[in-house]
């Protein structure tokens, strides 16, 4: 039984861009909920740790990737993988320069 009927690259790509933001917010809720969200965001951006926080959020893409593969939505899984590569490229570029 196919639970996901959407099998488009763009759908997976959008999911792959949204999930890291949600994952970063979950990270904030679990470990830094004592801080105000604005202060946390300002602190992460000013200290240069935004790449690390976003990289933790990318872990949710792994679940989406395998969920799409399990439900025979290969094009959607390719979209998630493409978004993950973009985040990886940004992280490597930022850390290198």
Image: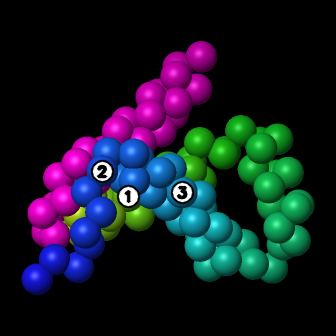
Q: Name the quadrant of the N terminus.
A: bottom left
Q: Which mark is residue 8?
A: 2
96 or 18: which is nearer to us? 18
Task: Give 45 or 8, whichever is nearer the viewer.
Answer: 8
Disc 3: which residue: 18
Mark 2 or 3: the one toward you: 2
Task: Choose mark 2 or mark 1, whichever is in front.
Answer: 2
Element class at badge 2: loop
Which label belongs to residue 61? Answer: 1
How many residues crowd mark 1 within 10 Å: few (<14), some (14–19), many (20+)?
A: many
What residue lies at 52% left-to-right and 22% top-to-bottom? 93
Q: Earlier in the sequence, mark 1 or mark 3?
A: 3
Q: What label sits on residue 27 in the rendered view?
A: none
Q: Residue 19: image x %, image y %?
A: 49, 61
Q: Do the residues labelled 2 and 1 touch (CB within 8 Å)?
A: no
- The residue at the point 47 percent across, 39 percent down is 87
**53 relative position to 44: left or right:** left
Say which residue appears at 58% left-offset and 26% top-offset: 94
Q: What element carries label 3?
A: helix
Magenta stretch, main secondary structure, is: helix
Name the residue at 32% across, 45% down: 9
In reply to whether residue 77 is colored magenta, the answer given is yes
The boundaries of the magenta stretch are 69-97
Label 1: element kind: helix
């Amino acid at each position: 039984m196919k639970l996901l009927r959407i099998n488009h690259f763009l759908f997976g790509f959008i999911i792959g861009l949204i999930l890291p933001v949600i994952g970063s917010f979950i990270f904030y809720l679990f470990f830094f909920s004592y801080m105000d969200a604005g202060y946390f965001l300002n602190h992460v951006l000013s200290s240069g740790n935004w790449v690390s926080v976003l990289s933790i959020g990318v872990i949710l893409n792994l679940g989406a990737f395998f969920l799409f593969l399990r439900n025979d939505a290969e094009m959607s899984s390719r979209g998630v993988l493409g978004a993950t590569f973009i985040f990886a490229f940004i992280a490597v570029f930022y850390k290198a320069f």
